[in-house]
Image (tube, rainbow, N blue to C red):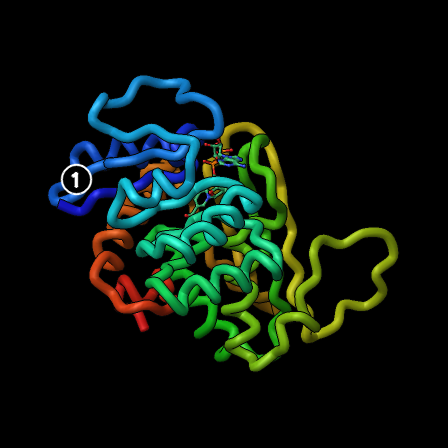
Amino acid sequence: MIKVGVFGASGRVGKLLIEDLKSTQGMSVSSVYVRNSLDFTIDPSVLVTSDMHTFLNGCDIVIDFSLPEACESLLEEAVKTPRPLVIGTTGLNTHQLNLLKQASEVMPVLYATNMSLGVALLNKLVYQASKTLEGFDIEIVEMHHRHKKDAPSGTALTLSESAAAGRNLDIDKVRVSGRDGNIGERSSDEIAVMALRGGDIVGRHTVGFYNDGEFIELNHTATSRNTFSKGAIRAGKWLADKEAGLYSISDCLELN
Ligand code: NAD
């Protein structure tokens, strides 16, 4: 039985993760990290703690859906108590991404801005389309619920990286977030990413390839957050016996 530590347990995805783990064979929740107290009831056998060291000691692997600052403190502590880490938190800054890389030198870390199978395939399709559709303008639009904190979404940023990779473009030079005012003529090697926020949209991403006379749009819509919690559980099962290293969802799904 793989004992799972849930980080971000009282969040939208964290709560579903705990529910989904109840019906997962070979895995169970053993510890949850809380800042204050849990706002829902949990099996009394689960260790509920605000002490990171105790939390990590109480599990075999960690699944994280929290916020960047919280993920940062998890990564700092995990280096002292290494555990396989499935990181789903998005909006990590450069420093936090570096911490993630450092952590992966001493433990297996799977980092995925989107845990769904559909988005993993979408990234492959976007790479292929970007490579094939030479000269097409690429624009990305993402839509999420009104509570989402980061924008553009981690998924949209990853999709822009897949599109840039298909054309050998340097992502730092080509990615534009949104458009405003008089932008002048569109440069052929930019990839714009636009974010819309409203209502309860779980997540929708469209990558468009536009040319004179034709365009193609690749679209993914998440209709349930269980897609993410179940994807993270699949990733955790896969990661549990891996060597130290940084892994992607494509590694786990063997899409490479
Ligand atoms: P949420 O705001 O509902 O939950 C955030 C959780 O983090 C809460 O449990 C909160 O208590 C906890 N938290 C906040 N600050 C903390 C701190 N300093 N220390 C410890 N815990 C802290 O958010 P959500 O919708 O559940 O999403 C969580 C994260 O997962 C976000 O970054 C979101 O973008 C990302 N996400 C990723 C995927 C994916 O597939 N990778 C899918 C959906 C959401």
* Horizontal arrangement in the rendering, residue 126 relative to residue 214 (left or right): left
- Pick the front one: 60 or 118: 60
Q: Can residue 113 be seen in this view?
A: yes
Residue 169 figure quarter:
bottom right
- Pick the front one: 229 or 122: 229
Please report the residue visible at 33 percent of the width from the left and 28 percent of the height from the top: 48
Badge 1 element: loop
* Marker count (numbered): 1
Q: Residue 248 placed where, x, y %?
A: 37, 64
Q: Is residue 12 visible?
A: no
Q: Is residue 10 above or below residue 123?
A: above
Q: Does the residue labelled 1 lie within 8 Å of ligand 1?
A: no
- Pick the front one: 93 or 32: 32
Q: Is residue 80 above or below residue 221?
A: below
Please report the residue visible at 47 percent of the width from the left and 58 percent of the height from the top: 218
Q: Residue 177 placed where, x, y %?
A: 69, 56
The residue singled out by tag 1 in the image is 24
Q: What residue type is labelled 1?
A: Thr
Please tell me how crowded label 1 is: few (under 14), some (14-19), or many (20+) other residues with Cα within 10 Å: few
Q: Is residue 23 above or below residue 99?
A: above
Q: In the picture, which quadrant includes the C terminus?
A: bottom left
Please report the residue visible at 33 percent of the width from the left and 43 percent of the height from the top: 227
Residue 53 figure quarter:
top left
Please report the residue visible at 43 percent of the width from the left and 45 percent of the height from the top: 221
Q: Residue 38 placed where, x, y %?
A: 40, 22
* Horizontal arrangement in the rendering, residue 241 relative to residue 101 (left or right): left
- Pick the front one: 116 or 134: 116
Q: In the picture, which quadrant includes the N terminus?
A: top left
